[in-house]
Image (spheres, grey):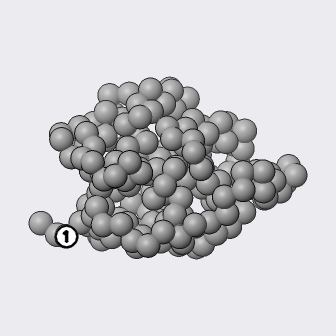
Amino acid sequence: MSAPLDRRRAVATLLHDPGDLLVVSGLGSATYDAGAAGDRAENFYLWGAMGGAAMIGLGLALAQPSRRVLVLTGDGEALMGLGALATVAAQRLDNLAIAVLDNGRFGETGGQLSHTALGADLAAIARGCGWERTAIADDAAGLAALAPRLRREPVFAVIRIAPAEPPRFLPPRDGAQLCHRFRAALGAG
């Protein structure tokens, strides 16, 4: 078995050359790493909105049907918002994908084991919620194959990463500023 993926490198791979991809990143690690991969107006960082990334991504995908939307979140947030997986799946949107960075830990509350470390299978849960396409990437080859799928398919993906905590990269935290720049990037501001 190969070593777990490095979280920061995995996100950099997913967000390499993002073009006009709209990214909604969940609280904590997903936001730190999306920002580290390149802070841009098309990134919508959720500060203090634990459990909301999938639903915000859904609203964005509904409002912007001609744009690709990627929700980037962690296993803790995905577990917190399991009902969102069924709601998103029921919409059957072609322009929305969700990628879950799964380190088997609740990173924002001290690194306690999450349910995925104790046997919960988020890809199986997503399938049970109605997602037709799911994927698991747990090595570099799997991640390389997954990255383009997230740009063209409605897929729910689990990316298994090491529990290491790289230094935090803090992108902008001013909610009003983030909202204004994101709206401007959408041409709505």
Q: Residue furthest front?
A: 110
Residue 93 place in picture, x, y as percent: 57, 37
Front one among 61 and 171: 171
Mark 1 residue crowding within 10 angstroms, few (<14) / some (14–19) / many (20+): few
Q: Is residue 155 left or right of residue 57?
A: left
Front one among 165 and 11: 165
When asked about the image quadrant of residue 162, the answer is: bottom left
Front one among 185 and 165: 165
Vertical relation: 189 (above or below) 3: above
Residue 175 place in picture, x, y as percent: 72, 51
Identify the residue shown where x is 32% and y is 28%: 128
Give amino acid for label 1: Ala
Q: Is residue 185 left or right of residue 134?
A: right
Vertical relation: 139 (above or below) 179: below
Front one among 94 and 177: 177
Q: Quadrant of the N terminus?
A: bottom left
Q: Which residue matches tag 1?
A: 3
Identify the residue shown where x is 38% and y is 48%: 109
